[in-house]
Amino acid sequence: MTQPVAVVGGGLAGSELALQLAGRGVPVDLFEMRPAVATPAHGTDLLAELVCSNSLKSDDAETASGLLKRELRLLGCRLLEAAERCRVPAGHALAVDRTLFARAVTDLVEAEPLVRLAREERRDLDLPPVAAVATGPLTSPALSSALALHFGEEHLHFYDAISISVGAEALDPEAGYWASRYGKGGDDYWNIPIDRERYRALAAFLREAPVIEKRGFEDTRCFERCLPVEVIAARGEDALRFGPLKPKGLADPRTGREPHAVLQLRRETRDGSLMGLVGFQTRLARDAQRELLSVLPGFREAAVLRWGAVHRNTFLDAPRLLDAAQMSRRRSGLFFAGQIAGVEGYMESIAHGAVAAVNIERFLRGRESLLFPPETLLGALQRHCAEGGSPYQPMNVNFGLLPPLSARRLERKRLYVERSLDALKGFLATRDCGLNA
Ligand SMILES: Cc1cc2nc3c(=O)[nH]c(=O)nc-3n(C[C@H](O)[C@H](O)[C@H](O)COP(=O)(O)OP(=O)(O)OC[C@H]3O[C@@H](n4cnc5c(N)ncnc54)[C@H](O)[C@@H]3O)c2cc1C
């Protein structure tokens, strides 16, 4: 019999991965450190515990979250089936009773004859020849140190400082100009000039605005290169102008002069519907973030689609460290899945576990790894992790990750969904994903 694959971490990605491998006839040793070693956010000893919201997001057919669920159903996702059995009423969202769900997944794993569940912390990478690490954003400190040694400290992010993102329709088209600094590259940034008076008001606002209270386990230590804007503002009147609001090389073509300060926005999705405020990570309270957009020039409405935040999140610089099959470029047979491997969110982590199982099983059989079609969100997640820019930013699924479709807005979402499910059905029918092992 094959030596069991070691899966480290019995969270969302690790539990799905273990069950999927077992479903393909592969024996697994699944290591989960709780309850012997706690994390700062988990409260039970159950596998697949949801640490915060109980929502696995929308199941509406015309949303990206809904499409991901449809793709996962085609792949026989075990945790999604469990979630459906534990759902609570929540409109279009698939929300679950957290404890019932975690209990259901634990039962599935414990009942699986090919999975041996070991309640043990793995503190290093001294693992069998084929192994997967799925230890999530709260990976234990000992294992984090081992990962830093394996990959180099600079490739492991410990805190995630999230910048504010807005819907493109929130931007006033008269208030800025497209350009890149010193004209290098394409005109990829939307630049909003800020005059001296507005700048002063903004700096004063940031110094005074309320920030979100720290939770006990959250350390506010952040990388110097991604400090929250309110921390920068507190360092001095001009600190923002020498930081994220630097105007150098960004002359306004309408006046020919460099403004006092410039706020830059960059596309976060291929269709440009989501725009991120560059370098504007913040832990301001939500009301204050809303108000911030009224202090800044250039926003017609406060359509915040992603709130700024700072929280502990251990993840790898996936595009530089892992190949598209989620395997370490430095050690053949060592795979990664879930949030540690550069995805963001509950469903995305489950999906990443399911996709990893396909390629681990193929690896065991000496087959080439598979990339899911680019028209699917499963394929888009693989590609984002393999090709994302630097510094790497984990992403929730969204339609902007898919190749663009030219159709009217209302029709577009339906077409994305149809195209993806057709592509996935064709792919599963013609590629050996080990589903019938
Ligand atoms: C405070 C907080 C709030 C969040 N809120 C949300 C939210 O509302 N919605 C959302 O979609 N996402 C949220 N996330 C992100 C969420 O954690 C992930 O999306 C998801 O849980 C990641 O799945 P995972 O399997 O990668 O990690 P996890 O589900 O965290 O699983 C990792 C498992 O590995 C175990 N482990 C860690 N180190 C070791 C070790 N050395 N040896 C053995 N076992 C180990 C852990 O105990 C854990 O069970 C939140 C994250 C945090 C930190």
Image: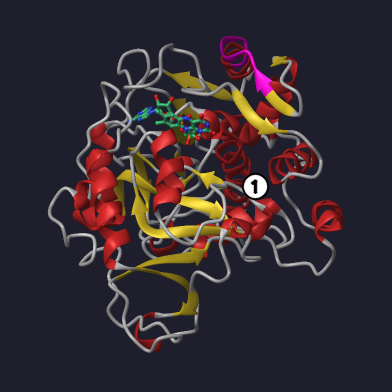
334 vs 121: above or below: below
Residue 209 appears anywhere in the view: yes
Q: Quadrant of ligand 1?
A: top left
**x and y percentages locating residue 389 in the rendered image:** 44, 66
User: Residue 20's spot in the image, x, y percent?
Assistant: 65, 35
User: Seen from this angle, which residue lies furthest left?
Assistant: 236
Q: Residue at x 54, y 35 (%)?
A: 13
**Which residue is located at x 40 percent, y 82 percent?**
252
Please give the range of residues in magenta. 95-101
Considering depth in this image, is 288 or 311 the residue closer to the camera? 288
* Residue 212, quarter of the rendered image: top left
250 vs 19, nearest the viewer: 250
Counting the numbered discs, the total is 1
- Residue 437 placement: quadrant: top right
Pointer 1: what residue?
Answer: 358
Q: Provide residue 233's location: percent of width, then percent of height.
A: 21, 51
Amino acid type, callout 1: Val
- Which quadrant: the N terminus? top right
Of 354 and 58, which appears nearest the observer?
Answer: 58
Relative depth, front residue between 59 and 421 = 59
Q: Image point 62% across, 48% down: which residue?
A: 397
Residue 308 vs residue 101: left or right? left
Q: Secondary structure at mark 1?
A: helix
| Above/below status of 78 relative to 34 | below
Residue 395 percent coordinates (x, y): 52, 50
Residue 97 drawn in magenta: yes
Ligand 1 near label 1 (Cβ, under 8 Å)? no
Residue 334 seen:
no
* Position above or below: 121 against 377: above
Q: Is residue 309 left or right of residue 187?
A: left
